[in-house]
Image (spheres, helix red, strand yellow):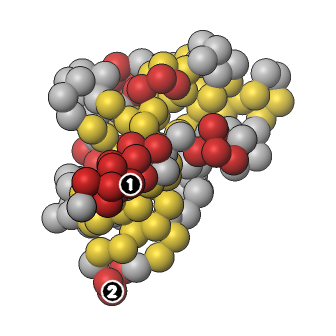
Amino acid sequence: MVRIAVVITAVKTHVADLTLCVGPSMMPTFNPKGDVVVVAKRERAWTGRQTRRGDVVLATSPTNPTQLVFKRVVGLGGDVVDVPHSNGRNFRLTTRRVRVPPGSVWLQGDNARNSTDSRDYGPVPEEMLLGRAMVRVWPLTAFGVVENSMQDAVLVRDGSAAAAT
């Protein structure tokens, strides 16, 4: 019985875990009442896969380290991100340009009008990323792969050229 517990703990810590995503910030990707998602952990160590623009990731909240958040990676270290200027949730037509420092990412919720994200707290160190959302397993009616896409029109520049996303 102890061996089984050790194996389960090792898998949950280093390979994959089930995580509940609740709240409106990732609508329509996730249901605000809650979806259960398989999160791949330490993927870079196992497969060499780097974090990519469009990935949905699980991260430690920069504003509350006791909470976890699901957000989409909009920019990588070195990217310049054009961010809609906001004052709380009152969006304006202007944008501000932010260069994401090396070793950091720019995270945004898919539901831009109801998400606390990098627009509020700035770039997030990669060390705060805990894993990548892979598959939604609950509810069963929504079972499927979590898509890597950026449907919002957020302009990202990689150096001087626009990045294809």
Kindly give the residue lying farthest to the bottom in the view shown.
141
Q: Amino acid at mark 1?
A: Val
Say which residue label 2 marks: 141
- Residue, disc 1: 7
Other-residue count near label 1 (Cα within 10 Å), few / some / many at <14 / 14–19 / ≥20: few
Whether 69 is drawn above or below 144: the answer is above
Q: What is the quadrant of residue 115 in the picture?
A: top left
- What residue is shown at x 69% (from left), y 47% (from top)? 47
* Residue at image location 49% in from the left, 50% down from the top: 15
- Left or right, 112 with respect to 57, comes to left
Q: Report which quarter residue 16 is drawn in.
A: bottom left
Disc on res. 33: none
Q: Is residue 69 left or right of residue 16?
A: left
* Closest to the observer, 60 or 118: 60
- Amino acid type of disc 2? Thr
Would residue 71 be visible to someone looking at this image? no
